[in-house]
Amino acid sequence: MDAVLELRHICAGYGDQPVLEDVSLVIPRHRVVGLVGESGSGKSTAARVAAGLLTPTAGEVLLDGQPMAGRRSKADCRKVQMVFQNPEGSLNPKHRVGRALEDAMVFHGTATRGEAREKARRLMARMELPADAPDRLPRSFSGGQKQRIALARALAVEPELLIADEATSALDVSVQLKMLELIRALKSERNLTILFISHDLGVIRYVCDDVVVMRAGRVLEAQPADAFFRRPQTEYGRELLDSVPRIDF
Amino acid sequence: MRQLKRPRRGALTLGVGLAMMLVMIALALLAPVICRFDPLEQDLYAFLRPPGGLHPFGTDQLGRDMFSRVLYAARTDLRIMALAEIAPFLTGLFLGMIAGYYGGWVEWAVTLATDTFIAFPYYLLVIVVAFATGAGVHGIYITFMLVGWLLYARVARGATASLRESEWLQSARLMGYSDWRIIWRELFPNVLPQAVVVLMTDMAGLLVIIVTLGYLGIGVTQPTPDWGTMIAEGQNFMTTAWWLSVIPGLMVVYTGIALSFIGDGLAEIWEN
Amino acid sequence: MDKNVILGVEGLNLYDRAGNQLVKDVSLSLRAGETLGLVGESGSGKTLTLRSLIGLLPEGIREKCAARRDNPNCAMIFQNPMSALDPLCPVFRQLCEVIELRQKTNPAETRARALALIRRLSLPEALADTDRLPGSLSGGQCQRLLIAMALSCDPEVLLCDEPTTALDVTVQKQVLALIRELQRERGFAILFVTHNLAVAAQVCESLMVMRQGEIVERGPARRLLTAPCHEYTKALTGAILPVPEREA
């Protein structure tokens, strides 16, 4: 199977505090892998290792089959982009939002300076942002809009892997749904590969092809989403599914 | 209403401060054109004249025109103030951002240095350096080169460290931008406002130091006109010729207020 | 206002300093033993309405209402259990202090009541002997402790401001079940403020949906969720991403 990214027996942590213990994870090309777990399960730490923001203490990260060690090259950086949870911090407050996209495209050569402006405008229009959006500063946008701009910036460099770390968790449900619909549409339009991290199983079921369950720094189970939602393999998987508040009368 | 009002109030404060400062700078720059008298020219027939007529600010005990002296003193004092701040401001900002961005031992070293020197009595240091280098303005320049940057390093380090974990900075790292590019293009525009606010406050403080040293006789030396030395000389005539000390004193207060207004105005505008 | 109402307000309007209307003509009332959910997205004014009911409006908010019924016997639990406890005081002692203050009990009786509450809420009994600081308890345990404190004054009304938003789903399920059970046992009324319709439906018999300071729809939970009338309620229920029951 063609994997965009693979974590092999990863151990990682902050300072002396170990967070991940022997985590292995495969993200196949053109699939959306959902990473589920409760707070402290290590799912965000796994994302940071995958993105290269945190160096693991043991284990191997393979990107496009190549082992990553030390600082990633410019070409490798382009391949993995990320959208974070907090909309308020997602954009540099002093930069026009269009500039963030243009700079990234020019830096990675996905557009020349001349083309970049038009390309950024088109991409932001695709994210259903207002036409004058590229010329405005981040503070004039709502939380949902900021997250869509962050998504546009990540996609501007045409990454091989998009990591969404609780990217819709801070949004109101109706705004969240709009962004999830967008992610689903973009996934088929652009053949994206996504590592989608969320604590919300409804969200995971809506966007993901595969589900990986983590708890206390370990991967408990990994299987296709349909199978997981019908028949979780572990006791904890069942407990998670049974805990979702349902509207049933 | 408060949220709408704050930036507007800030703009007003800033406008008044800038206007006051521009008037002062213009008067200093145009001094050779405006003044009818040489600030060093003595006229023993017209000593200690009260303000009015030919001498709007009066004359001193040697008959020198106070108006000329006050404006030429502004040239001296404002120039020292600006020159002594530029280098420390730039170095402090740069080192502070580096320390805040990289963290680790660089940050530890800069924090240790700033905390140590900020606890040190400032005047004592200036006086020690002034005695070592002899009276004159070099003492001020040297002291400021040595310790002036610490304040800015402290501010820039704090501002940078608070942004270090922000999502947009992580995104910039993920993009593969070099550290230099991140510091310069991403962090700098966010750190600069805070540093400029501190610059304004610190300049007012530095002006007071320059004047104080002049007053103590270890700053600007005679016969170059300087507000501090003028206040000191005028002391002997306080009861008979109040204008000798009061007018340069008012100049110091005026400039200090202008700088504070600029700093407060910028802080209010940039706060939101 | 109906004399059976134990806490309520009619025609509530709230304004900020600039005169912007934050809450518009909201009426709500609780009768003894009633469970009411107030649901809305961020900025809908749901928390302000709650705070107005207990007289805890933030500074600068102007209030106008046609009629109101206050109730001194309210207890409240908050979104972030960790920050609702004194971090430097051991938890059992905090519980005892509340009991002593509200019930004017002697030390032996205070301790007995605190122990009973701890047992009822399935908190470790060992806390009574080796007391611990809030920081060493989990979020779910802290929230249970806050519920214990709230119940220690035998409230007529329990106000809940997003009490499970900061908790993991498995813990959320336990806390919601606990609130429901305790309500049945003790018969207090509940006003449950949340952004999550599904969570509100676990606890409340009737629901009110708020949007931009106005109540757009109210009714029995079941009717409102299965056959919403207002467009906004439809949008909210439509935005719930369902997770079907797993196979047994």
Image (cartoon, coloured by chain):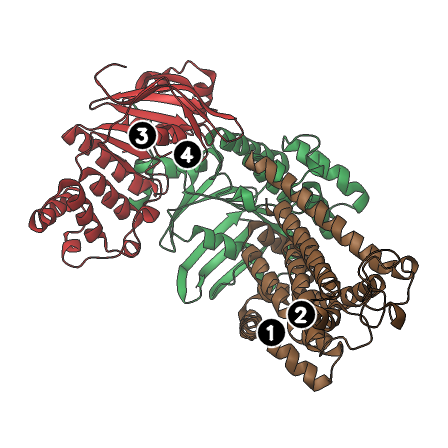
In the image, is B237 to the left or to the right of A70? right
In the rendered structure, which amino acid carries the disc numbered 4?
A: Gly
C119 lies above or below C184? below
Q: Are marks 2 and 3 in contact (CB under 8 Å)?
A: no
Q: Among the chains, which one is green?
A: A
At 71% across and 50% down in the image, what residue appears? Answer: B17
Q: Are marks 2 and 1 on the same chain?
A: yes
Q: Are marks 4 and 3 in contact (CB under 8 Å)?
A: no
B10 lies above or below C196? below
- Residue located beneath label 4 in the image: A202
State the separation of the CA atoms marked 2 and 1: 9 Å
Q: Quadrant of the rendered structure where residue B181 is?
A: bottom right
In the rendered structure, which amino acid carries the disc numbered 1?
A: Tyr
Q: What is the display colour for chain C? A: red
The chain holding disc 2 is B
- Residue located beneath label 1 in the image: B122
Q: Secondary structure at mark 3?
A: strand
Q: Quadrant of the rendered structure where residue B113 is?
A: bottom right
B87 lies above or below C46? below
Looking at this view, name the residue that lies furthest to the left. C108
In the image, is A138 to the left or to the right of A23? right
